[in-house]
Amino acid sequence: MADETQHPRPLLRTLLGEVLRRRRLEQERTLAEVARDACVSVQYLSEVERGRKEASSEIVAAVCDSLGIGLADLLAEVGRDLTVHRAPVLRLDMARLRRAAPAPRGNRPGDVVLLAA
């Protein structure tokens, strides 16, 4: 079994913000320009780009319009970035085992401990 603790799964809002920022910078536009065109504050757009705010679908659509990109293109790019992260999927039963199992001496924090049924 692969080590499922090596990289936490990235949040959608983080990847979405990274793609929006990348696209804005590719166009050599400032936060102020895009925020003005999208009718949002510069501070809010900055928070969205840094993955600190979960933007509504209306805000995402307005920013996409400002950048001249389609929502489908944005989501496809986010999907490609997500596959690059290759974050492992933690099965629910394994997550329960982690919480329920006491860590035997000598194991490192985060090690998966399997219990006999």
Image (cartoon, helix red, strand yellow):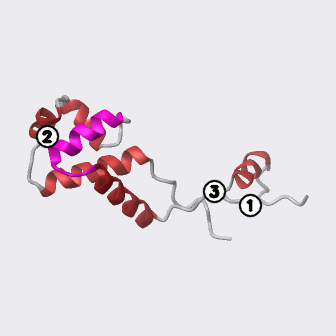
Please name the residue that numbered disc 1 is placed on.
106
Q: Amino acid at mark 1?
A: Gly
Q: Residue at x 29, y 56 (%)?
A: 73
| Category of crowding for the residue at label 2, using alpha-carbon neighbours closer than 10 angstroms: few (below 14), some (14–19), many (at least 20) | many
**Disc 2: which residue:** 34
Q: What is the distance, in whole Å, between disc 2 and disc 3 at their CAs?
A: 37 Å
Q: In this image, 109 relative to 67: left or right?
A: right
The x and y percentages for residue 36 are: 11, 33
**N-terminal-most mark, 1 or 2:** 2
Left/right of residue 89 with respect to residue 64 in the rendered view = right
92 horizontally vs 64: left or right: right
Give the residue displayed 12% in from the left and 36% down from the top.
37
Looking at the image, tell me whether mark 2 or mark 3 is earlier in sequence order.
Answer: 2
Residue tagged by mark 3? 90
In the image, 13 versus 111, the foreground residue is 13
Of labels 1 and 3, earlier in sequence is 3
Identity of the residue drawn at 59% across and 59% down: 89
Say which of marks 2 and 3 sits in front: 2
Instruction: Indicate which disc residue 47 carries.
Output: none
The residue closer to the viewer here, 15 or 95, is 15
**Quadrant in the picture for the C terminus:** bottom right
The part of the chain drawn in magenta is: 56-70
Q: CA distance from mark 1 to mark 2?
A: 53 Å
